[in-house]
Image (spheres, rainbow, N blue to C red):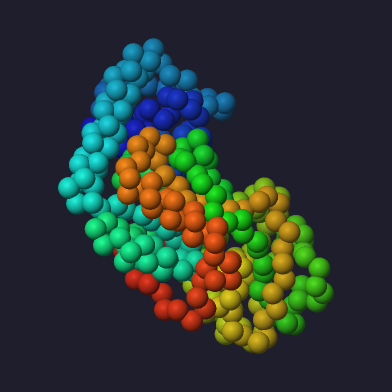
Amino acid sequence: MQLKVIESFVYLFQERNISKASEKLYISQQGLSRQIQALESELGVVLFNRSNSGVEPTAVCKLLYSHYKKMYDEYLCTMSTLNDYKKKISNSYSVAFAYGVTNSLSSDFMFDYQKQHPKVNLEIEEWSQATCIQKLIKGELDAAFLVTPLDNKLIKCTSLIEGEMNIAVHKSHPLAVGNAPIDFKCLDGENLITGVPENAVRGIMDYFCLKTGIHLRVLISSSNNLNFINSMTESIGIAPVTQTMAAKITNPEIVLRKVIIPERAFLYYCTPHNDEKCKDLADIQRYVVNYFQNTPVENLLKPNSAPIPLNRGPVCI
């Protein structure tokens, strides 16, 4: 029996809903259902009664829950102890950026911290936002830079900067006319040049579309849509860009328009809920917060700086 199956069992028992449980586990509903069915087959019992309104634990499921919950908690505790030990002997800490964040934000400042504190070993990683959250929950990451939307019941979130959204359009596009900010709903039906689904900035866009009920047609989905923006010679679609991404647009035929978004959007510095900060981790967080409080937004990304290589997880393009 794999631990991830026990984890899925615990989450489903608590949520009583496949959709909600799969969302918190960051797996598909089909994947969660397969795991539970495999567990039922292995045990030879029915654990949940399914209905249109959700799932209801059976009598045997209720008997088993406390045992599986204890196993899962012990696993998390064990991993936390192991990670604490590794940090203690190596003075090493892992900090991640969600995919797409480093397109908008230079990660130089974390390397500057490393230079200033040579006795601290920082492992800078890059994962999808969903993976970052799971790693934080499991204690496999010490901190991560993530963006809206986030559930602060799962992890601790310290807001660093509030972001604005702009769209980049060719000068011949109808939305290029005028100077007043555009309401987000006015983008309904537009062709979209955007990042891949795992991209954090794309995630914000998808979230706002869901929140407002509008639909956009994804025309180009790339890990670096700035290349398309800077080579655009005709009106083919709109591209959402952050303030710092806008600094890297060099195409003279591109017009930037500010968009009024339906909800405030933030860049966050996130840590596990159960973290007991050692001196180094507390110092890193103070450094990060101070850096963002004292650095103008336009200086957060150096327009001509080369990208810094990161330890990457799997990327889908």
Q: Is residue 312 visible?
A: no
Residue drawn at 49 percent across, 60 percent down: 291
Residue drawn at 55 percent across, 78 percent down: 248
Compared with residue 201, is residue 277 higher up or lower down, i.e. above or below?
A: above
Compared with residue 316, is residue 145 higher up or lower down, i.e. above or below?
A: above
| Image quarter in which the C terminus is found | bottom left
Q: Nearer the viewer, residue 118 or 179?
A: 118
Residue drawn at 51 percent across, 46 percent down: 158
Q: Nearer the viewer, residue 43 or 245?
A: 245
Residue 5 shown left or right of residue 1 in the figure: right
Compared with residue 272, is residue 168 higher up or lower down, i.e. above or below?
A: below
Residue 186 shown left or right of residue 232 in the figure: right
Q: Is residue 189 visible?
A: yes
Q: Report x, y in % for residue 52.
A: 56, 28
| Image quarter in which the N terminus is found | top left
Residue drawn at 32 percent across, 42 percent down: 278
Q: Report x, y in % for residue 96.
A: 38, 56
Question: Picture quarter containing residue 293?
Answer: bottom right
Q: Report x, y in % for residue 42.
A: 25, 27
Residue 178 shown left or right of residue 129 in the figure: right
Compared with residue 242, is residue 50 higher up or lower down, i.e. above or below?
A: above
Q: Report x, y in % for residue 78.
A: 23, 33
Q: How many marks?
A: 0
Question: Picture quarter containing residue 120?
Answer: bottom left
